[in-house]
Amino acid sequence: MKKNVLLPLFLVVFVDMLSFGLILPLIPYIASGYGLSPLLIGLLLAAYPIGQVFGTPILGRLSDRFGRRPLLLISVTGTFISLLLLGLTKTIILIFVSRLADGLTGGNISIAQSYIADVTTPENRAKGLGMIGAAFGLGFIFGPAMGGFLSQYGYQVPALAAAGLSFMNLILIAVILPESLSKEKRLQLRNSEKTKFSLGVLRQALNKPVVGPLLHSRVYFSVAQGVFQTIFALYAQKKLNLDARSTGFILGYVGILVVLVQALAIGRLTKRYSETTLMYVSSIGLAVSFILWALVPNLITLLIVLIPLSISSGVLNTVLRSSLTKSVGSEEIGGILGLSQSLESMTSIVTPILGGFLIGSIGTWAPGIFAALVTLMLVGFIRRKILKPQTVSFTPTFES
């Protein structure tokens, strides 16, 4: 693993997630100021993933053809402009537009993951992705906490601060981040049929014997995790009567848990256990955690439940991504990660709307039970489609 290359990427992802985390807990509160119902708040939260559905697979394929660095620059530029619009506008229509535009250009995380695949071997890829997960988690430690603190000066202030961080990220990419694909490799990939963007090619991936089950598993995981993530701020507001600042601190606490899992546990776990075993066990742990989340009576209990929930989701998320990168050839990594992100974004269109409906119509416990049921379906799917086809001595290097 090229640590001298991974450090600049670590900084880029950290700053990116810092800017994203700044506004994450604030969207429901911004929307509430316009008198929107929980269902309409869910629609606003869905604007970002709607954009990602269309933008991410295209950016992923283009990064295979033209390099990771230029596409990261394009993606972060879109984020900067979108956050600037969010901070300056005072109309709900333009807030919707800013979130949609951010989603259309927001493929930077999947491109960063493709970068990791370029500079790591299959044996240490999960550890490399864990480092990026740690940067992701660190952004979530400081971003929501900073956003919650700045929100006391007005909800536009965190958005403008996030825009400033995105601009700083552009400078970081331009100055310190080298390209991970050589000119020869980019030329080779540009001429490959597998890197050309085609909805048919992307659709065929779902039917491949190894790639398909992994992508289907990501959909199950994304639905369950998406209900938790996208509706958590609204849940905290309705269930525990927390303000934006307190919600931001809780999300920062989750970020600490994610960093500990990604930085300290992933590398050791993948050396000791197969990735399929980790998928299965972590999905069981996640299902149990969602049930506990649905039943928490107070803030202290919630903070305790968030520990196994964060551990299980962090392990499952990382090994699914690692396995995906090993299931295709190097010329398809950006495309398959872009497709994976696009499928996740499709689920994210539905999950905030669904979560808002469940909280508004049934109760604050309903999203947790729903997420648990979906995760239990994932447990059965992994057992049938991923564990059984593999031998006991499974090695995580796949053939597509």
Image: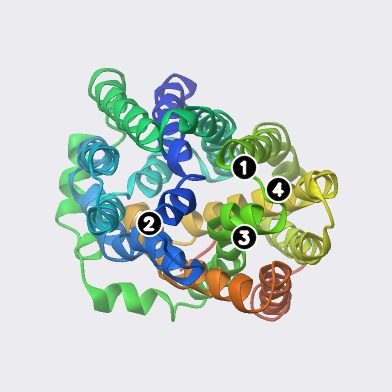
x then y, percent, for residue 373: 71, 77
Instruction: Tell us which disc is closer to us: 2 or 3.
Output: 2
Disc 3 crowd rating (10 Å Cα; few below 14, some 14-19, many 20+) is many
Q: What element carries label 2?
A: loop
Q: In this view, does 282 lie to the left or right of 141?
A: right
Mark identifier at residue 34? 2
Q: How many tags in the picture?
A: 4
Residue type at numbered disc 2: Tyr
Residue 353 in view: yes
Q: Earlier in the sequence, mark 2 or mark 1?
A: 2
x then y, percent, for residue 142: 55, 28
Instruction: Tell us which disc is closer to us: 3 or 4.
Output: 3
Q: Is mark 4 on a helix, strand or loop?
A: helix
Residue indicated by mark 4: 310
x then y, percent, for residue 287: 76, 67
Mark identifier at residue 247? 1
State how far apart marks 4 and 2 are (Cα). 32 Å
- CB of mark 3 within 8 Å of CB of mark 4? no
Q: Earlier in the sequence, mark 3 or mark 4?
A: 3
Residue indicated by mark 3: 228
Disc 1 crowd rating (10 Å Cα; few below 14, some 14-19, many 20+) is many
> Observer-nearest residue: 72 or 43?
43
Residue 211 in view: no
Task: Tell me where residue 186 sits by quadrant.
Answer: top left
Q: Earlier in the sequence, mark 4 or mark 2?
A: 2
State how far apart marks 1 and 4 are (Cα). 16 Å
Residue type at numbered disc 1: Thr
- CB of mark 1 within 8 Å of CB of mark 4? no
Disc 4 crowd rating (10 Å Cα; few below 14, some 14-19, many 20+) is many
- Compared with 185, 370 (above or below) is below
State how far apart marks 1 and 3 are (Cα). 14 Å
Q: Earlier in the sequence, mark 1 or mark 3?
A: 3
